[in-house]
Image (cartoon, helix red, strand yellow):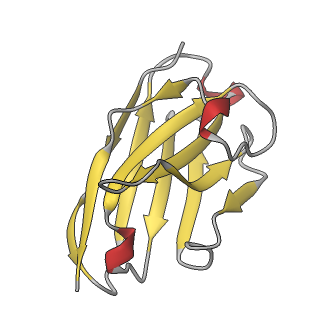
């Protein structure tokens, strides 16, 4: 089992940057694919990015491709989401999630473990 805690959210102006972190507990962190999702008020949870257990594969939603970067440090049980060129439409609660599936899962139902989320607000 994995417990996940996100941090790094906040308020930023459009065009700015934030780096989200997700700290995972458990000695088996490195076997999980990790993903970031987001949910804006009144909207469904949306896939943002995923990274394979080794870090060798990544996948991004079209809406963030070229602006966001997902990475992980298996020695420290951390996964990151570097967000650049932020837009007001990126405003949402961002969730970190862990999946036992291989590759880079993109559907929220493929993720068994979730953090509590961190709020990101981008002002125009």
- Residue at position x 37%, y 80% in the image: 87
Q: Position of residue 20 (x, y in %)?
A: 38, 55
Q: Quadrant of the C terminus?
A: bottom left
- Residue at position x 60%, y 56% in the image: 49
Q: Quadrant of residue 109?
A: top right
Residue 14 vs residue 23, the one in the foreground: 14
Q: Position of residue 68 (x, y in %)?
A: 53, 70
Residue 8 appears in the figure: no
Left or right of 20 on screen, residue 56 = right
Residue 65 appears in the figure: yes
Q: Is residue 8 above or below residue 26?
A: below
Q: Is residue 21 above or below residue 124?
A: above
Q: Position of residue 66 (x, y in %)?
A: 61, 79
Q: Quadrant of the N terminus?
A: top right
Q: Position of residue 106 (x, y in %)?
A: 69, 47
Q: Quadrant of residue 41?
A: bottom left
Left or right of 58 on screen, residue 83 = left
- Residue at position x 71%, y 48% in the image: 55
């Amino acid at each position: 089992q994995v417990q996940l805690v996100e941090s790094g959210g906040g308020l930023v102006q459009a065009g700015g940057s934030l780096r989200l972190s997700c700290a995972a507990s458990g000695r088996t962190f490195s076997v999980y694919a990790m993903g970031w999702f987001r949910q804006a008020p009144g909207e469904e949870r949306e896939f943002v990015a995923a990274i394979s257990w080794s870090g060798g594969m990544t996948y991004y939603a079209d809406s963030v491709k070229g602006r966001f970067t997902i990475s992980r440090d298996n020695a420290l049980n951390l996964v990151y989401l570097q967000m650049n060129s932020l837009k007001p439409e990126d405003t949402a609660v961002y969730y970190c999630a862990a999946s036992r599936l291989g590759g880079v899962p993109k559907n929220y139902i493929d993720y068994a473990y979730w953090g509590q989320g961190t709020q990101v607000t981008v002002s125009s």
